[in-house]
Image: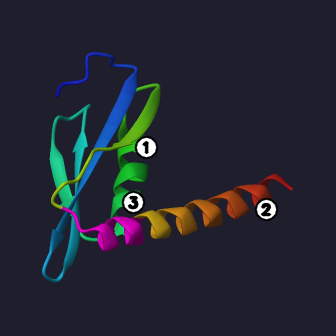
Amino acid sequence: MENSDRSLLTLEAKIFSHDNGFTIEIKNSETGKSIVVNSVRAYAEYLVESVNNSLCADFTAVWHPSPKAKREDIDLIGMQLGMMQEWMDKELQINQD
């Protein structure tokens, strides 16, 4: 899906479960390219890199339904994203004080 609104970078993600863990496929609307990562940290790093390299004015991250993902992988990714968000919120608060 090519992004018709060039002022908005959209990063779309889907989860795929495998015998030995999970992968996250991420599509970048600005480049039209997809990558596959195998950790929440790699997902977050790709988001930061994509936003920093983008010519768009704003961005959104979208999680699509992932019918090929196990519930436990979805829950684990959600927990890790929540923990990462808490850490970032604390860092931002410290930097603002």
Q: Is residue 63 left or right of residue 38?
A: right
Give percent across and percent down for residue 11. Answer: 32, 41
> Residue at left 18%, top 69%?
17
Marks 1/2: CA–CA distance: 22 Å
- Residue holding disc 1: 52
Does residue 51 appear to the left or right of 17 in the view shown?
right
Spot occupied by residue 44 in the image (x, y as percentages of width and height): 41, 59
Magenta stretch: give its range. Answer: 69-77
Q: Position of residue 28 (x, y in %)?
A: 25, 40
Instruction: Name the residue that disc number 2 marks.
Output: 94
**Majority secondary structure of the magenta segment?**
helix
The residue labelled by disc 3 is 45
Residue at x 47% of width, y 70% of height: 80
Quadrant of the snapshot with the C terminus: bottom right
* Labelled pair 1, 2 in contact (Cβ < 8 Å): no
Q: Residue 72: x percent and y percent? A: 33, 73
Q: Secondary structure at mark 1?
A: helix
Q: Residue furthest right?
A: 97
Q: Nearer the viewer, mark 1 or mark 2?
A: 2
| Amino acid bearing label 3 | Glu
Asked if marks 2 and 3 touch (Cβ < 8 Å), the reply is no
